[in-house]
Amino acid sequence: MLTAAEIEDGLDDAMKEEAKRVIDIDKLSLTFQTNDGPVHALSEIDLKIDQGDFVSFIGPSGCGKTTLLRVIADLEQPTAGSITVNGVSPEEARLKRAYGYVFQAAALYPWRTIAKNVALPLEIMGLSRAEQQQRIARNMELVNLAGFEQKFPWQLSGGMQQRASIARALAVEPDLLLMDEPFGALDEIVRDHLNVQLLELWAKTNKTVVFVTHSIPEAVFLSTKIVVLCPRPGRIYDVIESDLPRQRDLDIRESPEFLKIAHRVRDGLRAGHSYED
Amino acid sequence: MTDTALSSPRSLSPFAGLMSGTAGPVVVVVLAIIAIWYLGAIALNAAFQQDTYERAGRTDVPLVEFIGDTLAQERPKLPAPHQVAVELWKTTVEKKITSKRSLIHHSTITLSTTLLGFFIGTSLGILLAVGIVHSGVLEKSLMPWVISSQTIPVLAIAPMIIVVLGNSGITGLLPKALISTYLSFFPVTVGMVKGLRSPEVIHMDLMHTYSASRFQTFWKLRLPYALPYLFTSMKIGMAASLVGAIIGELPTGAVAGLGARLLAGSYYGQTIQIWSALFMAAFLAGSLVALIGLTEKLTLKRMGLSR
């Protein structure tokens, strides 16, 4: 399986030579030292992500999918191997504000209005007031929150709060969007709706998205590349290049191509998960 | 259906109307306290009253007159509520503020000490907390002193502060205010350390992804998060500051201030004067804390934190 993935990777490299490499991960491992001994959160991860890819990390809890995303964001430090983001170390990339990060919870500041929340990273970047206003308006529009600028977070539904947090990440205008189970806490219908919106956004902006989820339909529906991880130690079990068209609507989930990919993801999750322990 | 079933037994109770709002219970508690106070005053002052009658050779005093007399002594062990009320009225409304016997005059002196001490204490408390939160070395070196400072009885250290500062030529308001500071910086330090550390991990991570500086993280995240804690600590600090101001007035020779009134009252057995000074102090503390509460409400409302 691994060799197949490697061959696929190699072919992929040859085909997309002109595409810019955004993330290059090579034999990366991360071991947490705990009182109960070392925990191998990530082991020998090899992964390449190109400009414009929509990559999903999927796997059961404890497989290291969030940890891997946090390594890319320089929120965790790997203990072995190498990683570059836009050709530089994650720390340099972070200092250059190369990415926007969307957390599992909206993490809006309760004392700031929605517009002020979106402005937060812009204030930190030291942008001019006029520039801030422009970016707020543009990104609120992009996530369909225009008109809610002066509301406080608690006045918005969970789905709207998460959209506001996406607008906040987009306001940085990064080429790379890192999303950690952003819709995990939302109900199915809202999640479907936001998935469609996210795809539209991605198509409009040609950003690179790295998306963590534990929902198979969500991963298959969104992604151009699905990375299946398995736990103990956290490692890549399978990398699936999706042949679905980039323009998709929710109906595609009934198509045989979709179900075929979903089936392969499910197989990977099942095989990688050892139920004995 | 359910509504009538629920409300009908309630309306049978005679207290239904009285206890439904908040005013009812508050009034009941106040009346109970006053009643207990009167009973206590009668019980405590009875012995002295009996002595007085015996010396005067009176034996068969009617109960009503006896009770009336126990509540009208000049220097009772426990003055009755109306005696304290009358004294308060006389020393606030009927006396000129410039008079040495005006309670307003004494309150103003204690109030200015309290406010100065509170201001220094709060500033010091915030400063210490900021240092402690940002530096492990400062935390290890400062925190034990902060805590042990509060284990020393303030009554013991107050005269020493006054004497030491007096010998260095510092007299007047400041030495007394520093005793207020001594008591009021502590709750602010502890509350602010807690408050500045209260942002959730996810919010701190967010600032990290923005590559925010420590100052930006402090100003945009830690400080707003700590504000509710600050207001709570300030309320405690304000009350402590008033206690400190009164204690600070004791060793200065009891010239002026509510502390002076308390001390002079106890010298001359003027219990009514002591109690009215105590009530004035309680009223002052209550008003100051309420003022902070109001500021808190307005600030948090502006910040969208209270709904």
Image (cartoon, grey):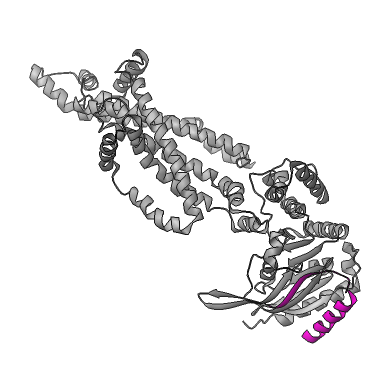
Work out whether residue A167 can be spotted.
Answer: yes
- Can you tell which quarter of the image residue A263 is in? bottom right
Q: Is residue A263 magenta?
A: no
| Placement of B121 over or under B141, stated as above or below | above
Left or right of A151: which side holds B249?
left
Residue A28 pos. (x, y %): 68, 77
Residue A139 pos. (x, y %): 80, 49
Between B58 and A221, the one lying in front of the other is A221
Between B7 and A224, the one lying in front of the other is A224
Task: Tell me what residue is drawn at x 54 percent, y 43 percent.
Answer: B227
| Placement of A71 over or under B130, stated as above or below | below
Q: Is residue A8 magenta?
A: yes
Task: Tell me what residue is drawn at x 55 percent, y 75 percent.
Answer: A33
Left or right of B55: which side holds A4?
right
Residue B101 pos. (x, y %): 29, 18
Residue A186 pos. (x, y %): 73, 58
Task: Tell me what residue is drawn at x 63 percent, y 68 percent.
Answer: A76
- Can you tell which quarter of the image residue A253 is in? bottom right
Q: Quadrant of the C terminus of chain A?
A: bottom right
- Can you tell which quarter of the image residue A11 is in? bottom right
| Placement of B53 over or under A253, stated as above or below | above
Task: Tell me what residue is drawn at x 67 percent, y 74 percent.
Answer: A63
Which residues fall within the magenta stretch?
A1-27
Work out whether residue B14 can be spotted.
Answer: no
Between B68 and B45, the one lying in front of the other is B45
Between A125 and B187, the one lying in front of the other is A125
